[in-house]
Every structure is written in structure tokens, then in C-alpha cells.
């Protein structure tokens, strides 16, 4: 049974072995089980931050669902939550999800060689497999690596993104140690209409998207198709790995999404949705021949059927069946190599009860069937997870309370109980203080448990566990917002190889730090600033977590001048540690600063022309040792809405 507060360190999982990533054909070194700490508040208000997308006043009334699974105003969320809406996405002129997420407080990204290449996302300094990514509420992660290939998701298909930081396993289950990112695909609203956009840029980059959607009577629908192609650069730097193939490694993505919602009356509706993103990726192998051509196809799919029903004024129900797939195929010089596919079949029944006291009660049950098919011989290829959950949110005058409990019962690694307690106190009309304590876990992957002989897999592994505390101070008034959040996340039973190269629950880590966000609108000028100062460390060795900076920040400003909108952005990251791509010895990655600028011109209310320059000063920097990043890029776009 679930205890009301099982706030011990609960199951989680961090390090998936290097061979698992080779199997996916993505050559990033995966050693993410260390963390560190540092002093905080001093430099906070010197914060620097991301390009401003939408007006601050629009954000104050946003409604979010990810933090609690119940709709609530963003300004009432007790978790530090960020919304990226459609206006933000369009104004950013970004191509893929990683390009947009890396501007947020508490979020670090790397891509090994440019757009479409293997990415890792580190939220609040946790491992890339410690952030749960959902698409319309559906898991699409790999069951062999534990991570989600968000590098394959193009923004042309996306309507909105909600980012919740901190442990929320008690709401969603495994992986949510660092937080949850929920991506919502485009849905039809209003009168049926077309949207068309396209553009060209450096590195022979081409982008096109077309969609049609809206409402016709009681039926809402949307169909969106997009194409992105670029020649890119050599994924690995030939100057660091002389034997690598120096040719440019391109990327080609074709994506399609569709959804239909039929309302039978004001209380009952049925929705069907689908998404497919197919990426053709060229990459480099640091250990291959100089003439090798390494390619792969990476396909993400999501299918969902949802019945929304309001049975009374106080009882709403949501019943969902869904399937999320991660399908990878690798090729060497045109010949087929490794192939692996994960299927996540999901059933969920969620009930929300409105209480007379003004609060709401959430009750739910879920079933997850995971199945792996691969050219690699896993000793077991399927497992089942049965889950029950409950949550309460309540408002008592100036006070707010959130309580969540959940149990996830894995057929292979047993049960995991998690809990969350959050509290908020309004101090006048503008200021609010928040506090929370929560537990989270990450179940071992199929590679951790069932890999073939010689991979170090161990069927007796326990889930990784996490215990998080955080305190926040929030201000919202006069078109200004300020969020200061301190977090302290302690992770135990991290999975790592012992001296016989067998995976064990060996390590423990601690990450504490501060994230700050400021946004304001002054007439036609918008500014936004974010800063994250953190100290990720391995509790036993004191070594820093790889590829994570102690300090990173963004600063941006946009100015509306009649039909013109001009923007500038400054991204900064401090030093990080990594493994040398040749020797595997620890090395330092230098700090970097990148400046981006943009301009948009509204020809009329439907037609817009845009120009963006990234890495304006052509800085040469590395996010992962030995891997290239893009130099100066220009992109000219045209969109009709």
C-alpha cells in the first residue's frame, strides 16, 4: 500500500552504459551519475536570459495541467513551471525542441554535432534519463536507454510545451526525478484555416510546413505535415579525432501529426490523435575508419484514443488508450546494422472530483506494457507496470496545499511508492512563497537488467531513488514576474559498473542550487532573464557531474517597432567536465558565450517574414568533447497563418 508520506529515498536510475548508446547508434558518452553543489543568491539579479517570446501579461493567466494533472492557473502552480505557447514557438524561429528548451532556467542541452544528432537533456543537473517527456500525455521513451529522443521532435508539429521542474514521480511515475516536459501537438480551434511556412538558411538548410485545422460544428480537427533538411557539419571534429570521416553529417526529418475530437454534447467527447517523426541521421564514429559512412533512421510514433466525460458538476473522467514507440535502425556504409524498437502500450483512467471546500481530488489507475524487439539478444523483452495514484489540491484563503501519492508495481523490479507535499502562502497581492518535499524513482532499463552476456547487465538491480526539497519566492504584478527557487535533490542507488564491469546500485549524488527567472513588459519592450547556479556532485568522490555547468544563464530583449519586431539573445555557460573522446580521461570543456539576433516583419495580420542569425560571432565551442557545434547560421523564413 501507499503510505501517505513515503518520503524516503525512492527508486531512480541514472547511468545507462556506453554500450547502450552505441546500440542506438548515438555516440555520446553516458556517464551521468555525479553531482555537485555551490553558494547561490549573490549573483542572482545580475541574471542574464533568453530571447523573449510572448508578452509577460499573456503568461499570467495561462492554464497548466502538467504540474498536478488538473487544470489550474499557472500563477497557482506550486512547482516551478514554465509554459511555452504557440506565440513563443513562432517568435523563437527555433527548429526543434532542444533549441527551445535550452533557453530555460534549470535546463541544459547538448547535441553531438548539430540538429537531429543525439541529445541529452539535464534538468536541474539530473541525468538525461531522469526527465520524463510526454507527448499529449503519452510516453515515447526508449525502454533500453530510459531516455526520450526529443532531438527528433520538430516544432512545426507543436502547439505548446509545459515544463515542470522537480520530483513529480508521485504524479507520473518513473523517470520524473528532475522534472516533466509535456509536449502538446497542434489541435484545431476556431474557423477552419490553413497555415504554411518555409525558409532557407546556411548549411543548405531547408524547412517547410503546411497544416489545416479548425472546428466544424461539434468536430475539431487538425493535420500538420513538415519537412526539414540540412547538410550540417562533421559531427566529430577532425582536428581532435584525425581518423574520423571529415564529411558533413546531414539530417533529414519528415513529420506528420493529425487529430480529431468529436463532442457529443457539452459533457462528453472522444478524441483520436497520431504523430510520426522520421529522422534520417548522419553521424560519426570516433573508432571507425576515415571512409565510413554512418547513418541511422530514428522514428518516434504516438497514437492515442481519449474519452473525456463529465458525469456530474463535480465528477470528470478521462479514459485513455495510447501507444508510444521509439524505433531505431543503424547502417554502416549502406548495410543494415543494429535495430531496436520500444513499444509503450498505455491505459489510464483519471477521475477528478471537485470538492465543496473549493479543492479538487484526483484518483487514477494506469497500466503500462513495455516491449522491446531488437537485433541484440535481450534475455527478457517485456514487462508490465500497474499503477494507482491520488492527489489533492486545495486553496484556503492565502494558503495553498498540494498532496500526491502513487504506487508503481513493476513485474520485474517490484513496487515503488512516491509522495509529494507542496505548500504555498500568498503575501499580499504580488508576492507568494512556496515549499515542497517529494520523492521520485527511476526503474532500471532493459539494458540494465537484461542485456546479453558481456554487457554487465544485472537482473537484481533496484530502482534508483530520489528525495527533493525546494523553496521558492515568486512575484507577479505590473507586467513583471520574478521566480527564485532553491532546490536540494539527493539521489541514491544510482546504477553504475563495479570493478568487474557488472552494473550495481553503487552511487549516490546530491544536486542543490538556485534557479532565477525574471520577465517584464515595458510598453513595446520585453525583457527576460534566467540564471541557474547549481552544484552537482558525486557524494562519494566529490567529482562534478559530466557535461553540466555550475552556472549558466540567458538574457534577451525584444522591441516592437511598428510592423517590425527585433530581438537579441545572449547565452552563457560556464566550464563543464567531460571524458576525452580519445583517451577517456576527464577533461574540461571551456565556458562559452553565444549571441543570437532576430528580426520579424508583419506584412499583414496573416503574413510574416523573419530573419534569424544564431552564433552571430561564429564562436567555436563544444557541448561534448570532440563534437562540433554549428558556426554562424542564418535563416530566412516566411509564414502564413
Image (cartoon, rainbow, N blue to C red):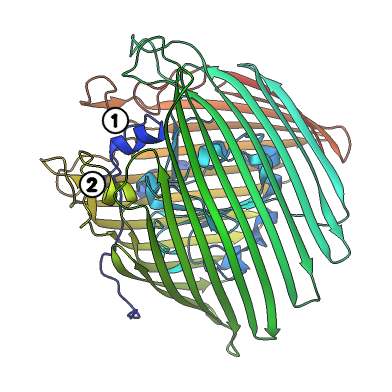
Number of dots carrying numbers: 2
Decide which of tag 1 and tag 2 comes sooner along the chain: 2
Q: Which residue, given by chain and number where applicable, does mark 1 sit on?
A: 578
On the question of residue 44 being in view, the answer is: yes
Q: CA distance from mark 1 to mark 2?
A: 24 Å
Q: Secondary structure at mark 2?
A: loop
Q: Nearer the viewer, mark 1 or mark 2?
A: 2
In the rendered view, would you say 244 is above or below 82? above
Q: Is residue 15 left or right of residue 460?
A: right
Task: Looking at the picture, tell me which residue is in the foreground, 444 or 190.
Answer: 444
At x 57%, y 78%, the residue is: 351
Q: Which residue, given by chain and number where applicable, does mark 2 sit on?
A: 457
Task: Looking at the picture, tell me which residue is in the foreground, 441 or 143.
Answer: 143
Location of residue 453 in the rendering, given as x and y in whole percent from the top left corner: 21, 41
Crowdedness near tag 1: few (<14), some (14–19) or many (≥20) residues, C-alpha within 10 Å: many
Task: Looking at the picture, tell me which residue is in the foreground, 367 or 130.
Answer: 367
Location of residue 571 in the rendering, given as x and y in whole percent from the top left corner: 50, 32
Q: Is residue 600 left or right of residue 115?
A: right
Crowdedness near tag 2: few (<14), some (14–19) or many (≥20) residues, C-alpha within 10 Å: many
Q: Is residue 270 left or right of residue 1?
A: right
Amino acid at each position: 500500500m501507499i503510505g501517505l508520506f513515503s518520503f524516503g529515498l525512492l527508486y531512480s536510475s541514472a547511468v545507462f552504459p556506453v554500450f547502450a548508446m552505441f546500440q542506438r547508434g548515438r555516440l555520446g558518452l553516458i556517464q551521468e551519475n555525479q553531482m555537485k553543489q555551490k553558494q547561490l543568491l549573490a549573483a542572482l539579479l545580475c541574471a542574464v536570459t533568453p530571447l523573449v517570446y510572448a508578452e509577460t501579461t499573456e503568461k499570467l493567466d495561462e492554464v497548466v495541467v502538467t504540474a498536478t494533472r488538473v487544470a489550474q492557473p499557472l500563477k497557482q502552480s506550486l512547482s516551478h513551471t514554465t509554459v511555452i505557447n504557440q506565440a513563443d514557438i513562432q517568435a523563437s524561429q527555433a527548429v526543434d525542441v532542444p533549441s527551445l528548451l535550452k533557453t530555460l532556467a534549470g535546463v541544459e542541452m547538448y547535441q553531438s554535432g548539430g540538429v537531429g544528432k543525439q541529445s541529452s537533456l539535464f534538468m536541474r543537473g539530473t541525468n538525461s534519463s531522469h526527465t520524463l517527456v510526454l507527448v499529449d500525455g503519452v510516453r515515447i521513451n526508449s525502454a533500453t536507454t530510459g531516455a526520450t529522443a526529443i532531438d527528433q521532435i520538430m516544432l512545426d508539429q507543436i502547439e505548446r510545451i509545459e515544463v515542470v521542474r522537480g520530483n513529480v514521480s508521485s504524479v507520473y511515475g518513473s523517470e520524473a526525478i528532475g522534472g516533466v516536459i509535456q509536449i502538446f501537438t497542434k489541435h484545431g480551434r476556431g474557423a477552419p484555416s490553413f497555415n504554411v511556412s518555409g525558409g532557407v538558411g546556411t548549411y543548405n538548410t531547408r524547412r517547410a510546413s503546411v497544416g489545416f485545422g479548425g472546428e466544424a460544428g461539434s468536430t475539431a480537427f487538425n493535420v500538420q505535415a513538415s519537412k526539414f533538411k540540412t547538410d550540417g557539419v562533421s559531427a566529430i571534429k577532425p582536428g581532435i579525432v584525425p581518423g574520423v570521416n571529415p564529411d558533413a553529417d546531414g539530417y533529414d526529418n519528415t513529420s506528420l501529426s493529425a487529430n480529431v475530437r468529436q463532442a457529443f454534447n457539452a459533457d462528453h467527447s472522444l478524441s483520436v490523435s497520431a504523430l510520426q517523426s522520421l529522422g534520417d541521421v548522419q553521424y560519426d564514429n570516433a573508432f571507425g575508419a576515415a571512409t565510413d559512412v554512418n547513418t541511422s533512421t530514428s522514428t518516434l510514433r504516438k497514437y492515442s484514443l481519449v474519452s473525456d466525460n463529465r458525469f456530474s458538476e463535480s465528477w470528470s473522467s478521462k479514459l485513455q488508450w495510447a501507444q508510444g514507440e521509439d524505433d531505431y535502425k543503424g547502417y554502416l556504409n549502406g548495410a543494415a546494422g543494429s535495430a531496436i524498437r520500444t513499444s509503450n502500450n498505455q491505459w489510464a483512467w483519471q477521475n477528478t472530483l471537485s470538492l465543496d471546500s473549493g479543492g479538487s481530488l484526483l484518483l487514477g489507475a494506469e497500466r503500462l506494457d513495455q516491449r522491446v524487439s531488437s537485433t541484440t539478444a535481450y534475455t527478457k523483452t517485456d514487462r508490465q507496470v500497474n499503477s494507482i495514484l491520488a492527489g489533492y489540491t486545495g486553496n484556503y484563503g492565502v494558503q495553498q496545499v498540494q498532496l500526491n501519492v502513487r504506487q508503481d508495481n513493476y513485474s520485474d523490479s517490484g513496487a515503488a511508492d512516491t509522495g509529494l507535499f507542496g505548500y504555498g502562502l500568498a503575501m499580499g497581492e504580488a508576492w507568494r512563497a512556496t515549499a515542497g518535499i517529494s520523492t521520485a524513482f527511476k526503474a532500471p532499463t532493459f539494458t540494465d537488467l537484461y542485456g546479453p552476456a558481456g554487457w554487465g547487465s544485472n537482473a537484481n538491480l533496484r530502482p534508483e531513488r530520489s528525495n527533493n526539497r525546494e523553496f521558492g519566492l515568486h512575484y507577479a504584478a505590473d507586467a513583471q514576474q520574478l521566480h527564485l527557487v532553491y532546490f536540494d535533490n539527493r539521489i541514491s542507488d544510482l546504477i553504475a559498473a563495479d570493478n568487474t564491469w557488472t552494473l550495481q546500485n553503487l552511487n549516490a549524488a546530491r544536486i542543490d542550487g538556485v534557479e532565477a527567472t525574471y520577465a517584464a513588459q515595458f510598453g513595446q519592450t520585453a525583457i527576460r532573464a534566467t540564471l541557474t547556479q547549481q552544484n552537482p556532485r558525486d557524494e562519494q568522490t566529490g567529482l562534478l557531474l559530466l557535461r553540466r555547468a555550475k552556472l549558466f544563464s540567458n538574457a534577451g530583449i525584444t522591441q516592437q517597432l511598428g510592423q517590425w519586431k527585433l530581438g537579441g539573445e545572449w547565452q552563457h555557460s560556464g566550464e563543464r567536465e567531460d571524458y576525452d573522446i580519445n583517451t577517456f580521461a576527464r577533461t574540461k570543456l571551456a565556458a562559452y558565450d553565444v549571441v543570437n539576433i532576430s528580426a520579424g516583419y508583419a506584412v499583414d495580420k496573416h503574413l510574416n517574414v523573419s530573419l534569424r542569425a544564431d552564433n552571430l560571432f561564429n564562436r567555436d565551442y563544444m557541448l561534448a568533447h570532440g563534437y562540433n557545434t554549428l558556426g554562424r547560421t542564418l535563416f530566412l523564413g516566411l509564414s502564413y497563418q
